[in-house]
Image (cartoon, rainbow, N blue to C red):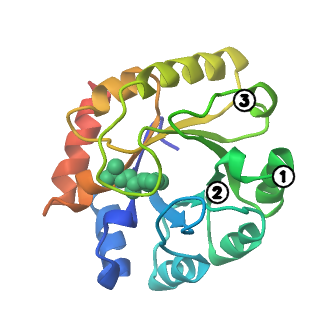
Amino acid sequence: MKNYLIAPSILSADFARLGEDTAKAIAAGGDVVHFDVMDNHYVPNLTMGPMVLKALRDYGITAPIDVHLMVKPVDALIPEFAKAGASFITFHPEASEHVDRTVQLIKEHGCKAGLVFNPATPLTYLDYMLDKVDIVLLMSVNPGFGGQSFIPSTLNKLREVRKRIDQSGYDVRLEVDGGVKVDNIAEIAAAGADMFVAGSAIFNQPDYRTVIAEMRREVEK
Ligand code: DX5
Ligand code: ZN
């Protein structure tokens, strides 16, 4: 895999043409499809389930699909998403009673596993879990909606997690989600992120290719 990944969040795609719009974002240079699952319980919004993910696979989407579970409880959905074709599954540790078990469950089902930290969630779980996860995802907005502004304190949190990953020597991705745009992605990358979720910044523009190319240029500079 590349040393950084751009993950268009299809939460901001055209739901009436989801297959087509997702394919367009990947053809335009997106590396990974970010798939937001919201349950109107853990977060105040309701989106898509495993059937929709399977429909994207059946439509012909072959790119990795990064399932971001904003649900509580977590475990029952894991086999369903794995069966539907998920590649990565991340969840919010405070939504699971047994975080280590949930990570094991994701791996047993053949997917890469990650923990997601809300802007005010401390990183303590990493003391015990950094050696067991493939991804750490820092939320740079409060989860539930696309189109919000990046919370600047995330930059320090990113630096902290980057340091911990580098010191550990483990192969762990550092993903960031919320308010990522062309004009802030360079400083987010400099703070240590290597996987960038972007929803409204890509899908609200007519030309996805240009936005993604600009994002890459910013990350590489
Ligand atoms: C928010 C979701 C995000 C959302 C990001 O809870 O997890 O993935 O789609 O949208 P933007 O990039 O518009 O902030
Ligand atoms: Zn997300």
- Viewer-nearest residue: 114 or 144: 144
Q: Which residue is mark 3?
A: 126
Q: Amino acid at mark 3?
A: Leu
Q: Are marks 1 and 3 in contact (CB under 8 Å)?
A: no
Marks 1 and 3, the one that precedes in the sequence: 1
Which residue is painted at 85% across and 49% down in the image? Answer: 98
Q: Position of residue 104 (x, y in %)?
A: 84, 52
Q: Please tell me whether mark 1 sits on a helix, a strand or a loop.
A: helix
Residue matched to label 1: 104
> For mark 2, what is the residue?
89
* Residue type, label 2: Ile
The residue that appears at 70% across and 52% down in the rendered structure is: 95
Badge 2, how many Cα within 10 Å: few under 14, some, many 20+? many
Q: Quadrant of residue 123?
A: top right
Residue 72, position in %: x, y?
Answer: 68, 61
Percent of width and height locating residue 28 = 27, 60
Specify the label residue 59 is tagged with.
none
The secondary element bearing badge 3 is classed as helix
**Distance CA(mark 1)–CA(mark 3):** 15 Å
Marks 1, 3: nearer the viewer: 3
With respect to residue 16, does 42 lie above or below?
above
